[in-house]
């Protein structure tokens, strides 16, 4: 009887989550389409870039169970690749973004190849060490311009037609990239491949005993997550028209972890909510005399104490409990 009740509760929670996510997704898309007419477009574009970055990281942590401390390498690396290609080689913006995604995926393949050989904290430390090596490479490489970074990156014309110097045109370009990236994460998670990733997260030894090549699946997930993080970084380079060392520091990797945990790992909407909250705090508290990092840290501690599943995860759990109570 208890097993039957647990199965019923799980089914109700799944249906509730699906309904809530579809409803919120429809509302969010409509709101995002209208947003640049009411809010500062650059602020929303920054929020979208970091939301996609958090979703890419959540694909690895929330759905595969791998904690990476080096995701800034893919985010910032793609920014450098795109900025250099667009400014120095005269590439179109879509080609520059594509190069950033491919470059981030290649970098993810190299780092992932070494990192997946270990588990737990050792995996996390290897990703951090390799990402720091990439940081020092960016510091010394001539094409990155060192501490000055690549500045004055032109946005160019999309497909040679649409002038992205227009804030609204640039916004809808970023929105399109964001929606494509989030849809890619959703499709991966809800595919047979995603089911295997979840089984690896829950019990890696069991997945191995069932005959799955766990190392290959983990490496594939790592590369996909790196590519999507690269898409976010490439778009950010065009939005702000520069690429700097800030995007490849370990602090950036810590920031995306914070965003994902705040929103709720293992959920589609959680990283988006977490990224929106952190970016909004950074933006509106930038003029405050009190350090923004301390305020962000305090809010993080409060959310962890009150919402152990993250903000979105806690909402899902409470809705599920309410529905299971009605069903009983």
Image (cartoon, helix red, strand yellow):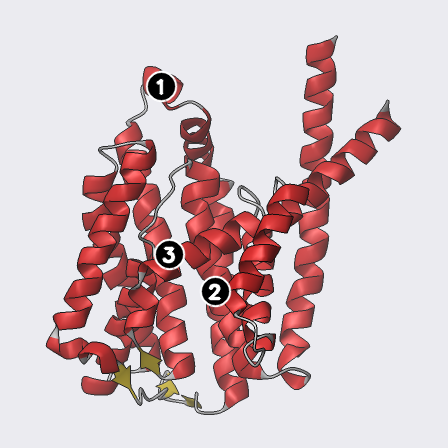
Residue 138 place in picture, x, y as percent: 19, 69
Residue occupying the point 28% across, 79% down = 83
| Quarter occupied by the N terminus | top right
Circles 2 and 3 in contact, beta carbons < 8 Å: no
- Residues 27 and 316: in front is 316
Give coordinates of residue 6: x percent, y percent.
70, 19
For disc 1, the neighbor class at 10 Å (few under 14, some 14 to 19, many from 20) is few
Query: Which of the marked residues, 2 or 3, is nearer the chain's N terminus?
Result: 2
Residue 200: image location, x then y, percent: 40, 28
The answer to whether 289 is drawn above or below residue 27 in the figure is below
Q: CA distance from mark 3 to mark 1?
A: 28 Å
Instruction: Measure the alpha-carbon separation of dots 2 and 3.
Output: 11 Å
Q: Using the image, determine if residue 205 lies above or below residue 75.
A: above
The answer to whether one can see residue 248 in this image is yes
Residue 90 shows up from this direction: no
Q: Which mark is residue 205?
A: 1
Task: State which tag comes first along the sequence, 1 or 2.
Answer: 2
Q: 236 or 171: nearer the eye?
A: 236
Q: Mark 3 — residue?
A: 253
Residue designated by label 2: 50
């Amino acid at each position: 009887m208890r097993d039957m009740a647990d199965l019923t509760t799980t089914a109700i929670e799944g249906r509730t989550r699906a309904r809530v996510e579809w409803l919120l997704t429809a509302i969010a898309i409509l709101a995002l389409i209208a947003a640049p007419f009411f809010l500062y477009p650059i602020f929303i574009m920054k929020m979208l870039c970091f939301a996609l970055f958090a979703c890419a990281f959540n694909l690895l942590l929330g759905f595969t169970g791998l904690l990476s401390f080096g995701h800034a390498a893919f985010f910032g690396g793609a920014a450098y690749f795109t900025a250099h290609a667009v400014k120095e080689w005269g590439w179109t913006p879509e080609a520059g973004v594509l190069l950033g995604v491919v470059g981030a995926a290649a970098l993810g393949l190299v780092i992932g190849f070494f990192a997946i050989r270990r588990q737990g904290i050792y995996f996390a430390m290897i990703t951090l060490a390799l990402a720091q090596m990439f940081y020092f490479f960016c510091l010394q490489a001539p094409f990155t311009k060192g501490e000055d970074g690549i500045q004055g990156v032109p946005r160019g014309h999309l497909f040679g037609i649409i002038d992205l110097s227009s804030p609204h045109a640039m916004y809808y370009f970023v929105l399109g990239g964001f929606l494509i990236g989030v849809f890619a994460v959703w499709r991966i998670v809800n595919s047979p491949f995603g089911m295997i990733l979840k089984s690896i997260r829950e019990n890696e030894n069991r997945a191995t005993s069932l005959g799955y090549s766990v190392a290959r699946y983990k490496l594939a997930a790592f590369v996909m997550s790196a590519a999507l993080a690269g898409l976010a970084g490439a778009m950010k380079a065009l939005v702000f028209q520069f690429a700097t060392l800030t995007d490849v520091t370990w602090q950036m990797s810590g920031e995306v972890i914070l965003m994902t945990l705040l929103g709720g790992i293992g959920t589609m909407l959680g990283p988006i909510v977490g990224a929106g909250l952190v970016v909004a705090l950074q933006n509106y508290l930038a003029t405050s005399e009190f350090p923004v990092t301390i305020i962000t840290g305090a809010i993080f501690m409060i959310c962890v104490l009150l919402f152990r599943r993250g903000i979105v995860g806690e909402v899902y759990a409470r809705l599920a409990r309410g529905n299971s109570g009605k069903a009983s």
